[in-house]
Amino acid sequence: MGPKPKRLTNIQAGRPPTAKPRRAMSRRASRAVINRHHQLEKKARIARESGDAAAAASASAELASLGGLKRYQEASLQGQSVERGGDTSRVLVEWLPTGRDAGRRRRLRMLEVGALSTRNACSVSGLFDMVRIDLGSREAGILQQDFMERPLPESEADRFDVISLSLVLNYVPDAAARGRMLARSLSFLRRFDGEEASSDIIDTTTTASALPCLFLVLPRSCVTNSRYFTVTKLKELMDMLGYALINERMTQKLAYSLWTRRRDVTVAHVTFPKTEVNPGRDRNNFVITLDSSAMIER
């Protein structure tokens, strides 16, 4: 009679070894990846503009060695994880008073540009019919698409009640392209149908009074530590585009704002130049500019 089989002391002891889960990126590591990515993007852009092909290739090669866009998205997704309380869309759900709007018969149509997940607060709230796009889709439910290449709406039904640009503009490599993106948002929002806003901040008590709207999130340093851009400058620019401020919030790291479309504008001849407003050695160069190239597409 052979030896008795060894008795298992617990269920886990009888399972084959499994791969250990990948350790989550630390907050410091994710921030370092994001910052270095932006630095290299800027370095490559400046090199291309100056005709320095070797420097541009070197910066692009380093970007690729760091994991490129995929690694940047991983760092961004980790930074906005629910576990870390970083889902910026929770603020939008909080600000839109959908629960008090008893007369609303349909879900709001929302375009999320730069979507990283189908499980954020907006997606699971049940309040929105979501369309999510990103330059590099990471999962089903997110269309891989450049917002600047997205076909224009063919009818009012194809437009959106809400557009989210959360931590998107700061990724756009140059100031003029940021302005074009803001101007293009008007082509995708539903037409404004109401009286022009007269106050700096609109006190909204129903969803209808806030729509159509643009949710904008920037790193706080873009509006508090830039040589060329401030909260006041942002409000001036948005006013030129026909937007009125609904709500705003500043946290330690982020600047949130919600803007409603309050009048139709033509920006073909409107300019918003780069002007130094905060001199200083330790400030950054973030800015958004607007010129005739930002003409609204119809």
Image (cartoon, grey):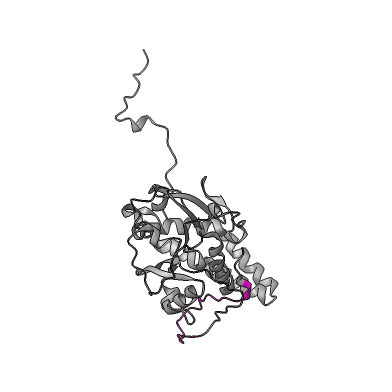
Task: Please report the residue visible at 55 percent of the width from the left and 70 percent of the height from the top.
Answer: 178
Location of residue 58 with respect to 128 vertically, above or below: below
Locate residue 214, reporting x and y percent.
46, 63
Locate residue 157, reporting x and y percent.
53, 52
Task: Please report the residue visible at 52 percent of the width from the left and 57 percent of the height from the top.
Answer: 71
Locate residue 111, reporting x and y percent.
50, 55
* Quarter of image, res 148: bottom right
Of all residues, the one furthest to the bottom in this rendering is: 279
Image quadrant where one finds the N terminus: top left
* Quarter of image, res 87: bottom left
Task: Please report the residue visible at 41 percent of the width from the left and 59 percent of the height from the top.
Answer: 79
Marks counted in the figure total 0
Q: Is residue 200 left or right of residue 266?
A: left
Task: Specify whether residue 48 is in view.
Answer: yes
Location of residue 158 with respect to 165 vertically, above or below: above
Image quadrant where one finds the C terminus: bottom right
Q: Nearer the viewer, residue 202 or 182?
A: 202
Magenta segment includes 135: no
Q: Which residues are magenta?
A: 276-293
Q: Is residue 148 left or right of residue 110?
A: right
Location of residue 282 with respect to 73 vertically, above or below: below
Task: Specify whether residue 115 is in view.
Answer: no
